Image: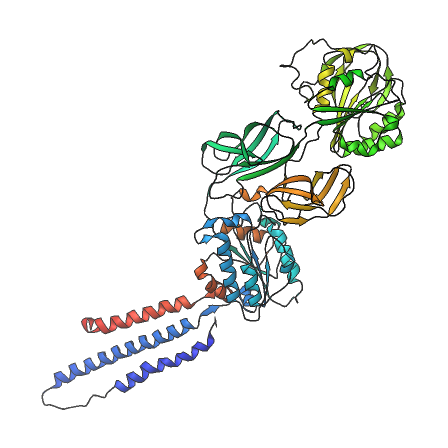
Amino acid sequence: MKFIYPGFLWALFLVLVPIIIHLVNFRRHQTVYFSNVSFLKKVKKESQRKSKLKQLLILACRVLLLAAMVLAFSKPYIPSEVGEQQQANKVVCIYIDNSFSMSAEGPEGIALESARQKAYAIVNASLPDTKFALLTNNLEKKHFRFYTRQEIIQLIEEVELSHLVTPLSTIVLRLNGLLNNFLFSTQQLVYLISDFQRNSSDLMNLQPDSVTVFNFVPVEVNNVPNLYIDSCWFESPAHHVNRVEELFVSIVNDSDNEYAQLPVNFFLNDSLKALSTLDLKPKEKATVKLQYTNLQAGIQRGRIELSDYPVIYDNRFFISYRVDNKLKTLLIYSNGKQDTRNIEALFLNDEYIGLDKVTSDRLQISRLPDYSAIIVYELQKISTGLCDELSKYVETGGTMVFVPSFFADTASYNCLFNKLSAARFIASDTVKIPVNHFAFDDIVFRNVFKKEVENVDLPAVKYRYRFNQGNENQTKALLSFADNTAALSFSNFKKGKVYVFSFPLSEKENEFVNHLLFVPTLYNMVLYSQSSQNLFYVLRNDRFFEVKSNGGELLQNPVVRNVENNTEFVQSVFQQGGSRIRLGIGPEFEAGIYEVLNANDVIGEVAFNYDLHESELNYYKAEEIITFAKQAGIEKVNLLEQKTSEFEGAVRDLGHGKKLWTLFIGLALLFLLLEIAIIKFWDYFF
């Protein structure tokens, strides 16, 4: 047995006080002789013996009472291995979970504030020469060093809520990296203060440790229901003025409550554009459709909102997309011999699509990124330079529609197809064959017919090429001949689209141009040529974002500015190719809409949303924390669940093994009660 305050044992000399008092008050009985009083002598001697016994018992109770009180105030304990290490501790690392889930209220108020108070208590309970380190989910550089008592208190005061979520295993690895700077003999102590949410506290991934003492400090939060927006998407990737948009929003009910007629609001450019309601069962994920019309061209700023309390950080969801006033399409043909009148007539005076045409020998390569779609029309040969530029164009999000010439250099065609991972031409055929099938489910034909029908009168083709069969998993046949070979193939390449006809359009015996199917096929390929825009990026999950530039080189590093609070960040360009610019997503970004500026000119906008891991409010229980930590190989583990008012004392007592002072307090009370009983009831019984 050892004592926390052994110096208090000097107070054991106080037991002499009742002994001295007893001796001073002890008086010898004077013998007085009377005649014929032998009976009285016998009674008197018996009374004296009982009185002495009573006084001795009272003295013993008082001595034992004082001894028990002195021992209780000396804080006796039975030392343990972990306790001895903590008592000699000189290095303390504290982790404060400052993720959004710590904004929830608990029995002692806001969880983050409770975590701060417990961190203060840890500092106050530590030895004066202890070195301290503090880590949060932000993993800031200033935290990767050790501080004095006053310095660490200042750092704790500066801890604020953050959208960043760092797995607990990563936090522990960083803490071990800090502790490795000290000698093995230095006692090392870690406090992990968190609500221990299941999504971020990956306890099973902790590394084994037999040296460091890990103290898990769970911060209790109230169990509250939560609704959050999981994601959203458009039915069509193309966005045009005065056309109806269909926005689908996925909403999750992470609670045991049922919701009826839950309102979902959609704001576009700060104006309410759509409102809908939905019913949600407990733990259900549902989708609601919002319809509205784009009334203007340019960049659109969208915001979806829910009304949900008290968890509010996931009630808003931001999107940003571009609506082009008119799609620009380029028709590339050779020396003017091809008949392009049908294609020109198709887009003549169209309000959505503008057509430019140019011969291959007058093509300006630098202007290719300006077009959403390029129609390569019956060129006799694809030059190496044009092949490279077309592949770059498609790679960065462009759409290419390829119409072959029947008497052409197919080797140059296949060179382009190889670069685009598209199906290649392997043979030609002059046997007339009808088209007998087209893909009703593809966006090119989705709205052409009211319903899927059979035995449609489709055109026939005489002059055609056959595709190889090696790319079936990468290509899709939008049109097929009667022999099940592809007439029109589609494939994706990186961010772009590739459509390849297997037959020329200008051959008179190819009936496709004169068929009603020609108009919706070619028109829809151009109409939906816009590559799917990234409506939003998820902070923490995405490392980069892209914006579309107007071409040319950047004169300086772009500036990213929050449109709500005008906060600006200077970003470095990671990659620039064609019309796309890739920029990095830093930890300083918050959810919202951001403008991307170059030399004060807005070149694009982007929307950021928070990671939704924090929206699933599930926490580890105390016994689970200890179980998983020990299963992970951490040998020295403590769990501190005391309230904030008792926490500092719990930290002080943590290193003292099995505490015995409460036992001695109980003994002191027992001796006090025994003394009172002897004084009050002795004469009654004896």
Q: How many marks?
A: 0
Q: Position of residue 390 (x, y in %)?
A: 82, 31
Judged left or right of residue 14, residue 317 is right
In the picture shown, does residue 246 fall above or below 646?
Answer: above
In the picture shown, does residue 249 fall above or below 132?
Answer: above
* Residue 301 at least partly seen: yes
Q: Quadrant of residue 348?
A: top right
Judged left or right of residue 158, residue 439 is right
Q: Position of residue 541 (x, y in %)?
A: 64, 43
Instruction: Tell which of 682 and 242 is nearer to you.
Output: 242
Judged left or right of residue 607, residue 27 is left
Q: Which residue corresponds to the image point at 43% horizontal and 76% vertical from the top-left?
A: 8
Q: Residue furthest left?
A: 36
Q: Which residue corresponds to the image point at 66% horizontal and 45% vertical from the top-left?
A: 560
Q: Quadrant of residue 525?
A: top right
Q: Position of residue 493 (x, y in %)?
A: 76, 31
